[in-house]
Amino acid sequence: MTDDMLKEMFRLREGFMLAMTKINPDIHPTWPVDLTDKASQQILRDTALKGVEEMFEALQHLKNWKPHKQTEIKEFDREEFLEEVVDAFNYFFSLLVLTGVDADELFDAYIKKDRIIHDRLRTGY
């Protein structure tokens, strides 16, 4: 196990993207993409939406969320749920790789936003 799991996840995803590009050169543009380019923005949007679709697939495993439903389904396939969440993360990692964001930049942005939301909580935002 690596000491920096986030960096390893980025490394694995980019490795997969490079392997896919060798098989099908048109599957991904050269990255990082030009964020001002219309075609690049369309690719980024499509990639993000694929991640959202995978999250919806994960949510399909939640059977007891309707407040009006009287019955409860006790079976839950945690492995399949987690697999769909990982699929979503893979698309979101692809989005970050395509935009040139690395693990350090994502971590820094996360810490910055975490401070903001905790400050909001503290100040009654």
Image (cartoon, rainbow, N blue to C red):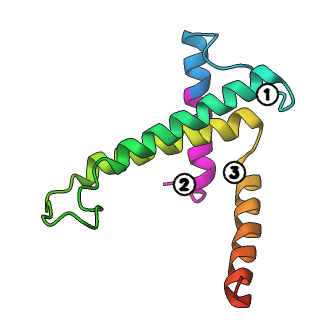
The secondary structure type at the circle numbered 2 is: loop
Which residue is label 1 attached to? 33
Task: Please tell me which residue lies in front, 73 or 15.
Answer: 73
Q: Amino acid at mark 3?
A: Ala
Which residue is label 2 attached to? 2
Q: Amino acid at mark 2?
A: Thr
Q: Is residue 78 left or right of residue 57?
A: left
Residue drawn at x 52%, y 45% as measured from the top left = 89
Task: Please tell me which residue lies in front, 46 or 106.
Answer: 46
Is residue 12 visible in the rendered structure shown here? no
Mark 3 touches mark 2? (CB < 8 Å): no
Viewport quadrant of the C terminus: bottom right
Camera-nearest label, 1 or 3:
1
Mark 2, Cα crowd under 10 Å, few <14 / some 14-19 / many 20+, is: few
The answer to whether residue 72 is magenta is no
Query: Considering only order in the chain, which callout, 1 or 2, is on the residue closer to the N terminus?
Result: 2
